Amino acid sequence: MKTLMKLAIAAALGFFLVPAVEAQIATPNTTLCAAQTQTATTVCLASITGVVNQTGVYVDGEYELVQLANTQVLTGSNVLVPVSRNNRNAGSGPTAHANGSIAWIALTPSASKVPGVNGFSLGTNVTDIGTCTRTAQIYLPKIFVNRNIKRDCNGSGVWVDYAPESGLDYPSPSPLVAIAANGALSVSSGNYVLTTKAGVIALTLTAPTAGVQDGMVIRITAANGAYADTLTATSLLQTGGGSSPYTTATFGATTAYNGATLTLKAYNGFWYVISSTGVAFT
């Protein structure tokens, strides 16, 4: 009797609503087993694991919904699955998708490890910025459907653009982050704007790890009025000319330089300057 009472109290307190999660798992994905036209009402999936009625299929920024009869169960591989197109405010409408395209699977609550949590967000705000704890995430990457953004919590405990070794869906657009104070940039993909501060914004950046962080992209845009903001990356800025590698990138010091932009890509332990406008190197 006491055991039954304890179980009843635990249930009332919600202890059984969310099962324990030991660590994050990969957001499910498969590939298209045939090309899909812009008007097709079926999609060919190489694997249908976890795919039931109302499962989401996210391909190239388009969100499709599986449309099955209540009693219909899919079996086998390379299955032609009926879908509705252009859902969840994703993309600008149905588009054609090539054979072999990555199809991310948005599991229904009954199929998810934790009901209602499947690695997808339908909100407009990208909240996964800054520090994170990888083992606290149920599914990674996290996909922001109507922004076509995928975010990953890396081994250093920082939210970054999803960039798997296989190169799937990379690079994902980075959320814009405002900076109004001196500081060190994370060695990760990022999209930054230098906003108003009563003085120069001085940033620093260390070297990316060769062969591990290759391909990360950092973009910095100046909007700090009359101040010559700087980025210091000691002997790491490869510009393709002059006395490269340089140490400091300096943004123009008048309001005419608002919009000056620097784009860097990590490769082999250096930061390669992909483009720069209104920026000087020393």
Image: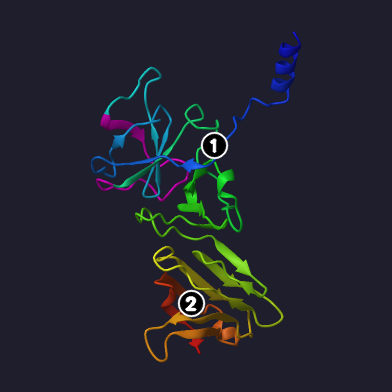
Q: Is residue 250 left or right of residue 212?
A: right
Residue at 59 percent across and 50 percent down: it is 133
> Eyeballing the image, is 109 above or below 12?
below
| 78 drawn magenta | yes
Identify the residue position indicated by label 2 in the image.
Answer: 262
Where residue 79 appears, as percent x and y from the top left, is 27, 31
Q: Pick whichever, 152 or 110, lies toward us.
A: 152
Corner quadrant of residue 34:
top left
> Eyeballing the image, is 122 above or below 170?
above
Tell me if label 1 and label 2 are in contact, CB under 8 Å.
no
Three-letter amino acid code at the position of disc 1:
Val
The residue sitting at the bottom extreme is 242
Where residue 113 appears, as percent x and y from the top left, is 51, 32
Q: Pick whichever, 206 or 216, lies toward us.
A: 206
User: Which one is earlier in the sequence, the residue at label 1 or at label 2?
Assistant: 1
Identify the residue position indicated by label 1 in the image.
Answer: 117
Q: CA distance from mark 1 to mark 2?
A: 37 Å
Where residue 244 appears, as percent x and y from the top left, is 42, 87
Three-letter amino acid code at the position of disc 2:
Leu
The residue sitting at the top extreme is 1
Q: Residues within 10 Å of mark 1 (few under 14, many from 20)?
A: some
Where residue 236 appears, as percent x and y from the top left, is 47, 80
Q: Is residue 169 left or right of residue 133?
A: left
Helix, strand or loop under label 1: loop
Badge number at residue 14 = none
Q: Residues within 10 Å of mark 2 (few under 14, many from 20)?
A: many
Q: Which residues are magenta?
A: 77-100
Residue at 42 percent across and 50 percent down: it is 91
| 275 drawn magenta | no
Residue at 61 percent across and 67 percent down: it is 178
Helix, strand or loop under label 2: strand
Residue at 24 percent across and 44 percent down: it is 35
